Image: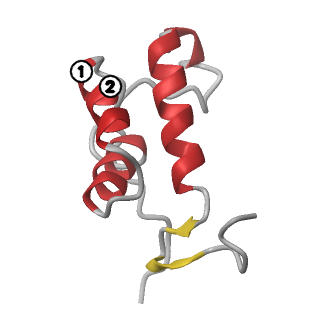
Amino acid sequence: MMVGNGCTNWDYDCNPATIEIGYGRAMFSNAIYKTIMDNDCANNDAEFAATEHLVTPICAEACGAMEKSITHYDFYNMYKYAAIDPTN
């Protein structure tokens, strides 16, 4: 039996996967998705100090809007809210 984090390849997992999974399950808007894709924001990740200087302002805004939209979802249980009160 193996247990671990599913993030294994930065080109496909983590932020790129979050974008596709979240959009595919209608967790954020078409406009946010279009902005992310049109500006190649999928691999611009501000979470890591080593790459945050590469993030453009439009990507920071679009990915921030996506993060805000998906906050209440539990990615290990996609169809259930992570928060007891989803309006919180």
Residue designated by label 2: 35
Residue 29, numbered circle = none
Q: How is the image coloured?
A: secondary structure
Distance of label 2 from label 1 (alpha carbons) = 5 Å
For this rendering, which residue is in front, 19 or 12?
A: 19
**Quadrant (top left/top right/bottom left/bottom right) for the N terminus:** bottom left
Seen in the picture, residue 66 relative to 45 is either above or below; the reply is below
Image location of residue 8, percent across then percent down: 37, 53
Determine which residue is flagged by label 1.
38
The residue located at (60%, 29%) in the rendering is: 48
In the rendered structure, which amino acid carries the disc numbered 2?
Thr
Q: Position of residue 75 (x, y in %)?
A: 48, 68
Residue at the (30%, 17%) spot, across then down = 39
Query: Which element is circle 1 on?
Result: helix
Q: In the drawing, does residue 12 fall left or right of residue 41? A: left
Task: Determine the residue positioned at 69% across, 65% down.
Answer: 87
Q: Position of residue 77 (x, y in %)?
A: 47, 80
Q: Are marks 2 and 1 in contact (CB under 8 Å)?
A: yes
